[in-house]
Image (spheres, rainbow, N blue to C red):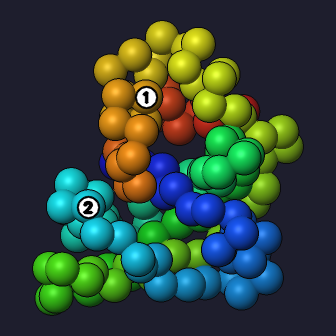
């Protein structure tokens, strides 16, 4: 499974992740998003999505490790990947039928969204 992680770039941006190399993904409180974090596995691919004014998929990352021993605060360590050659906007996502049933479109406030292979490829421009 692949996932999309939403972040407000003024709080923590993809550039911050690239500079640090790795980070613990936290600050998630939605029960559905927490379930997705707890279910992540090392090696799974991630899309980093900037919220706020940008509203676009900006780069990739991968899961390094998951410690779900505290169900309310799973510790998911992620590693920076590469920046998208061109950010993929929310408008482009909404216009693509691949996302018709996606929580990315249907549940706009969900901060951790599962993706299928085709969705991941679209969001990376592959």
Question: Which residue matches tag 2?
Answer: 30
Residue neighbourhood size for the residue with mark 2, other residues' Cα within 10 Å, grouped as few (<14), some (14–19), many (≥20)? few
Task: Name the spot of residue 24 as percent of width and height, x first.
Answer: 47, 84
On screen, 57 above or below 44? above
On screen, 126 above or below 12? above
> Outermost residue, right direction?
85
* Secondary structure found at label 2: loop
Residue name at image x 51 percent, y 76 percent? 78
Residue 115 appears in which quarter of the rendering? top left
Task: Name the spot of residue 21 as percent of width and height, x first.
Answer: 69, 83
Residue name at image x 69 percent, y 33 percent? 89
Residue neighbourhood size for the residue with mark 1, other residues' Cα within 10 Å, grouped as few (<14), some (14–19), many (≥20)? some
Residue name at image x 49 percent, y 57 percent? 5
Q: Is residue 45 visible?
A: no
* Secondary structure found at label 1: helix
Q: Which mark is residue 21?
A: none
Task: Name the spot of residue 58 as percent of width and height, x first.
Answer: 72, 50
On screen, 75 above or below 123? below
Residue 95 appears in which quarter of the rendering? top right
Question: Which residue matches tag 1?
Answer: 105
Which of 53 and 82 lies nearest the eye of the viewer? 53
Q: Earlier along the polypeptide chain: callout 2 or callout 1?
A: 2
Residue name at image x 77 percent, y 40 percent? 87
């Amino acid at each position: 499974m692949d996932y999309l992680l939403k972040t407000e770039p003024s709080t923590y941006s993809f550039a911050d992740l690239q500079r640090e190399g790795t980070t613990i993904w936290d600050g998630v409180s939605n029960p559905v998003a927490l379930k997705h974090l707890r279910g992540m596995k090392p090696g799974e691919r991630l899309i980093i999505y900037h919220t706020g004014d940008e509203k676009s998929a900006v780069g990739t990352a991968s899961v390094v490790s998951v410690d779900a021993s505290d169900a309310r605060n799973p510790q998911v360590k992620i590693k920076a990947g590469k920046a998208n050659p061109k950010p993929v906007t929310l408008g482009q996502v909404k216009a693509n039928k691949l996302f018709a049933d996606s929580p990315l479109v249907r549940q706009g406030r969900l901060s951790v969204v599962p993706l299928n292979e085709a969705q991941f490829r679209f969001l990376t421009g592959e």
